[in-house]
Image (spheres, rainbow, N blue to C red):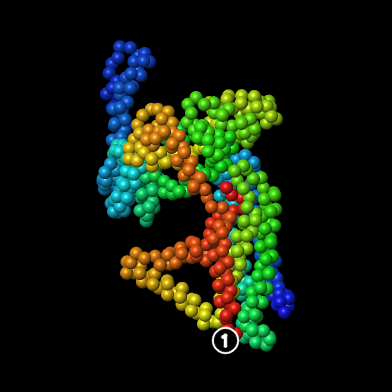
């Protein structure tokens, strides 16, 4: 049953997977194009690191983008068919959801592999000055974890009912309303910033997306 | 220059030009030296008058040693900026903030302005922010104390000192110099050498080894353009004598790149000021001594102790790389598992 699920999910999402894989391969390779000289003065090293750092934003964006589209693709046909297909299968709901999740995760392993191979190619093609190091494995591992986590988030949201999505949106809206009212009352309380900061810092769920996503670094 | 300034300058020169017995160069120079302060004072006055004319009526705002002339509509904002600037300036320059009293600032709507010679001009857009005025005040205040040759620039307030330490770390680990590498590994004499704190050190030979000298010459456009082709070719082909000769012969035209440049030097100076407390800046600029002696005086500690503290701070400021700490990896997996379990518990009934 898993093979069939994987096959159908591949058919629905192959364009996304192929495009994501190409982009995932290209980012690390392109990010180190400016690494061409062995001995650098400090300002050149700084410029090189800045250039690589500017590409760093592309990895979490790609991970989030791939996760959103894969989660939507995984549940889209079920939503359109009003879940009749799922009801007709002789498996419990949790099993069906796990198969869907597993099929999506397997397909997302392809862009992760592409980041890893791209990072290895980029490392081999770049001239790494003394004092700097390449991190192809760490970069691929971070990308894999970020992608898996983002996929879990959007998969959970997509698997829910419209009512669940409504609750989530209402929660976000309530936070914004409280923030606006606090500001109108001249209360110095940054609720949005505090929540966002907690989510981005340890042990927040979004910490994996922060930091320096750099193939070559100190 | 306006007609008024020309007239004032001419009057000043005429006032000093009394009939002289001889017209030799020394006498002329002495007379010029006598007249020059009068001319400068007159020019300052003329500048002030010109500025007032050019910028329109200005409010005079004072806060401690700071005197700022500002357009009336900008005055409240400038007053706030001055109030915020004062404690910052005090913390950076200590008792030396008194020097700022000899200077004037003009905060005026943006227009084509020139440095007037008697004050600093901060041209601002139609709706300026307090931060813009504050930043300009702080940056221009650093000009009052002049450039420092050892530092390679001006010393002023740094908005992000922690970033400066991280930048110093990058400079330390990427400097193509044996002295900097030795410093990274913990050799304080190498730190002193890389910072240029050892008087009489042969920088050509001690900062860089033979291979680094060759690469330095080969990669620097200046040498490629200026050097005799034969010497350049010999150096890049492996002759260290040729490299040393080239570097020494051009030392008067171009500085040999310093292994630890102004980023690291500024961070070392900041560490010295932290150790030295108030009065440290006064010690730094107060006397004409070697950079090492001035740093030690500012820090109130030996140079070795200062370098050791700086090195520890810089190593602690190493930027985080892409490597995931174990706890982050586990927390991410935990959150992912929780969310997956939530998805598994979703209902098929819509």
- Residue at image location 30% in from the left, 52% down from the top: B80
- Residue at image location 39% in from the left, 69% down from the top: A179
Q: Quadrant of residue B270?
A: top left
Q: Quadrant of residue B145?
A: top left
Q: Nearer the viewer, residue B194 or B73?
A: B194
Image coordinates of residue A43 in percent, x first then y, are 55, 42
Quarter placement of the N terminus of chain A: bottom right
Image coordinates of residue B91 in percent, x first then y, are 34, 44
Q: Nearer the viewer, residue B98 or B12?
A: B98
Q: What SS does tag 1 mark?
A: loop
Q: Is residue A190 above or below residue B113?
A: below
Residue A199 visible, this angle: yes
Residue A73 visible, this angle: no
Image coordinates of residue A187 in percent, x first then y, are 33, 66
Q: Is residue B118 above or below residue A5?
A: above
Q: Left or right: A144 with respect to B31?
A: right
Q: Is residue A147 above or below residue B56?
A: below
Q: Left or right: B69 with respect to A207?
A: left
Q: Left or right: B253 with respect to A181?
A: right
**Residue that numbered label 1 is attached to:** B350
């Amino acid at each position: 049953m898993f093979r069939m699920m994987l096959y159908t999910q591949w058919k629905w999402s192959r364009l996304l997977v192929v495009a994501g894989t190409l982009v995932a391969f290209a980012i690390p390779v392109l990010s180190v194009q400016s690494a061409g000289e062995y001995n650098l003065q400090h300002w050149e090293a700084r410029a090189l690191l800045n250039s690589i750092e500017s590409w760093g934003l592309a990895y979490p964006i790609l991970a989030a983008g791939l996760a959103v589209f894969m989660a939507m693709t995984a549940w889209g046909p079920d939503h359109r068919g009003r879940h009749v297909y799922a009801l007709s299968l002789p498996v419990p709901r949790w099993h069906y959801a796990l198969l869907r999740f597993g099929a999506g995760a397997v397909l997302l392993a392809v862009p992760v592999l592409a980041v890893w191979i791209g990072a290895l190619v980029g490392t081999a093609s770049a001239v790494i000055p003394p004092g700097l190091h390449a991190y192809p494995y760490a970069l691929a591992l971070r990308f894999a974890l970020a992608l898996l986590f983002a996929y879990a988030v959007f998969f959970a949201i997509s698997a829910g009912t419209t009512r669940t999505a409504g609750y989530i949106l209402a929660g976000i809206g309530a936070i914004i309303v409280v923030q606006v009212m606090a500001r109108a009352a001249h209360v110095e309380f940054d609720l949005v910033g505090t929540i966002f900061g907690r989510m981005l810092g340890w042990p927040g769920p979004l910490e994996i997306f922060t930091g320096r996503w750099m193939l070559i670094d100190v | 220059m306006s007609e008024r300034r020309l007239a004032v300058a001419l009057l000043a020169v005429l006032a000093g030009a009394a009939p002289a017995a001889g017209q030799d160069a020394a006498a002329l120079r002495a007379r010029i030296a006598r007249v020059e302060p009068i001319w400068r004072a007159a020019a300052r006055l003329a500048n002030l008058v010109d500025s007032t004319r050019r910028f329109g009526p200005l409010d005079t705002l004072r806060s401690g040693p700071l005197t700022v002339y500002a357009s009336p509509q900008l005055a409240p904002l400038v007053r706030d900026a001055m109030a915020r600037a004062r404690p910052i300036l005090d913390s950076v320059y200590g008792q030396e903030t008194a020097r700022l009293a000899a200077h004037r600032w003009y905060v005026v709507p943006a227009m084509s302005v020139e440095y007037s010679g008697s004050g600093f001009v901060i041209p601002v857009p139609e709706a300026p922010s307090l931060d813009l005025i504050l930043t300009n005040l702080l940056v221009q205040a650093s000009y009052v104390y002049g450039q420092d040759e050892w530092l390679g620039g001006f010393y002023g307030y740094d908005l992000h000192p922690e970033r400066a330490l991280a930048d110093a770390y990058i400079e330390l680990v990427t400097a193509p110099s044996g002295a900097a590498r030795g410093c990274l590994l913990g050799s304080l004499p190498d730190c002193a050498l890389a910072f240029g704190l050892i008087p009489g050190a042969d920088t050509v030979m001690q900062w860089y080894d033979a291979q680094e000298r060759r690469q330095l010459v080969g990669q620097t456009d200046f040498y490629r353009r200026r050097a005799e082709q034969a010497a350049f070719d010999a150096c890049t082909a492996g002759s260290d004598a040729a490299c040393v000769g080239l570097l020494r012969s051009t030392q008067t035209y171009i500085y040999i790149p310093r292994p630890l440049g102004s980023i690291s030097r500024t961070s070392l100076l900041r560490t010295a000021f932290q150790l030295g407390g108030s009065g440290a800046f006064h010690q730094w600029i107060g006397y004409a001594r070697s950079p090492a002696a001035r740093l030690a005086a500012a820090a109130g500690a030996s140079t070795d102790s200062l370098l050791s503290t700086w090195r520890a701070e810089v190593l602690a400021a190493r930027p985080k790389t892409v490597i995931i700490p174990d706890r982050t990896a586990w927390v991410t997996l935990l959150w992912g598992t929780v969310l997956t379990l939530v998805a598994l518990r979703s209902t098929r009934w819509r």
